Each structure stands twice: as C-alpha cells, then as structure tokens.
Amino acid sequence: MDGVDEERLVRLVAEGDRAAFEELYRRTSPWLAVRLRRRCADAQIVAEVMQETYLAVWRAAGAFAGASVGGSAVGWLWTIAARRLVDAFRRRAHHARPPVAVTAEAVVPAAEDEVLAATVGGDVGDALSRLAPELRDVLQAMVLDGLSVRETAALLGVPEGTVKTRARRARIAMRKALS
C-alpha cells in the first residue's frame, strides 16, 4: 500500500478494507497526535479524541467527498479531529478548571515544539525558534510533516495563497538567519 495515497486509502476504508484503515492510521496518527497535543496538554483528552476520530473515519469514510470538492483526506481527517476536540472540551466544561490549552499562558512548551527541538537542533533549530509562529507553523507542516500547500491550508485554516506567502517569507527569514 506504499504507492496508494491517503485519498485512495479513505475510499478503500469506505469499502471495509481493514488493511487500508491500518495504513491510513499508520501514516496519519503521528502528526495528528502532535497537532492535538499542541492544542491540548491533557493526554487523556488527546487519546479520547484520537480514538473517536479514527472510529468516525471508519464509520463515515463513505461520506468523504475528496478532491472532487477541493478537499484532501488529511484535511478531512483534521476537520474530524478538531471537531472531536471541541466536543471533548464541551463535555469537560463542567469542571472548575479550563483545559490547559485554553489558559492564557501555558507553562509547559507545546508537544510539537518539543518534537521540533529534538528533531532539528543547532543553528537551524535556533533559527526556527525565532520565526514568527505563523511562519514556523507553515514550515513545520510543509517541510517536517510533508504536507502539500493545499493540505497545509486546510490544516491551518488559511487560504492557499497565504500558505505560499508565509512559506516564502519563512524561507527568506531562515536563509537570512543562517547566513
């Protein structure tokens, strides 16, 4: 299944193909977990959202419209996960303390930033850490996560033109910082 793209995997999942589901999970769960951890520091909520997301993918894969409406499998998966995360926050709203990701200043660095620091070190890591957050997010999605411009736009909720502009600005800033 190495030559099969994520959209085709979703279509196979819609037909009940367990191997396709396992491959889709293998390809998408690491970055999805990182993205969710960035928005919520509660590991239990993240685990619940991951489980609910992939259960929803298994059940609703037939409803995936895909490229015919300008979407991508990765963007569709992220939309499901983001909605499940909001639902989880609502379910836990009766607690006196808000979820950690909602507080004004998080004491612990985001999981994605920790992964980035461990993966990219030295001068490159320093240059990345000095980028504006919106530029760093685009570089992380496109370079480290390997997403396309369209997938990055869907993931970040910005237009494709904005992704291209931010990617260009980030590359210029990185070249300047590393020269």
Image (spheres, grey):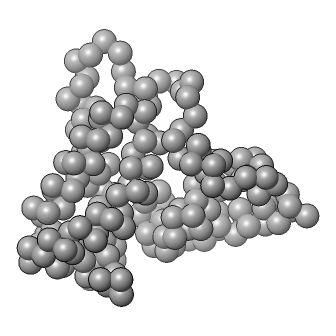
Q: Is residue 142 left or right of residue 179?
A: left
Against 173, residue 40 (above or below) is above
The residue positioned 30% from the left and 33% from the top of the image is: 44
Please identify the residue farthest to the top as the structure is shown. Answer: 96
Q: Is residue 75 visible?
A: no
Query: Hey, which quadrant is residue 76 in on the image?
Result: bottom left
Figure label count: 0
Q: Find residue 65 and report its horizontal and vertical position in percent.
A: 21, 75
The residue positioned 73% from the left and 52% from the top of the image is: 121
Against 144, residue 133 (above or below) is above
Q: Is residue 74 left or right of residue 59?
A: right
Q: Find residue 50 and report its horizontal and vertical position in percent.
A: 27, 48
Between residues 93 and 123, which one lies in front from this camera angle? 123
Q: Quadrant of the C terminus?
A: bottom right
Between residues 169 and 99, which one lies in front from this camera angle? 99
The residue positioned 78% from the left and 61% from the top of the image is: 174
Q: Find residue 18 and report its horizontal and vertical position in percent.
A: 14, 71
